[in-house]
Amino acid sequence: MADENKELQVWELFREVEKEMSREEKKQVMIEKAINLKLMCDYVVSCSYGDIVLIICMIRDYVRNLDRERDDIQWEAYYRGRFMDMADRLSRQIEYDYDAAVEKCRKKLEKEKKTAILAGMLWL
């Protein structure tokens, strides 16, 4: 039951992030000089601001989940740092603060939970 509650909170967090992204979604992020080494040609790749935010969130959530599951030296010494560096670099480039967004969502969820509890008390 506790796992289902946590899962529900994660989905609520994703919905909140998506609402925030919808205002920024029309912005495009250009990734220039993406090189295909097999064909030896380069590309300009475009994706929306919301896509980059989603990638950042997925990387950070992946790292958080693996921190709970893994404790080997290879994860700690190499992969964890690589993933966090990637997420941090992308965040800086689009001026997105993952920690602030998570805190904002948590506060909103807490407020909604308190409101629901109070509403439940009024019906009693």
Image (tube, rainbow, N blue to C red):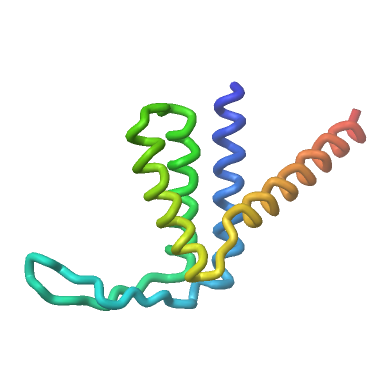
Q: Quadrant of the N terminus?
A: top right
Q: Quadrant of the C terminus?
A: top right
Give the residue at x 84% y 33%: 120
Q: Nearer the viewer, residue 112 or 102?
A: 102
Q: Nearer the viewer, residue 94 or 105?
A: 94
Q: Residue furthest left?
A: 39
Give the residue at x 43% y 77%: 28
Q: Nearer the viewer, residue 91 or 2?
A: 91
Quadrant of residue 119 in the image?
A: top right
Quadrant of residue 96 in the image?
A: bottom right
| Number of on-image labels | 0
Q: Is residue 34 above or below residue 123?
A: below
On the image, the x and y values in percent for residue 9 come to 61, 39
In this rendering, position of residue 99 left or right of residue 58: right
On the image, the x and y values in percent for residue 51 come to 43, 63
Q: Residue furthest top?
A: 1
In this rendering, position of residue 26 left or right of residue 20: left
Q: Is residue 49 above or below residue 116?
A: below
Give the residue at x 69% y 46%: 106
On the image, the x and y values in percent for residue 39 come to 7, 70
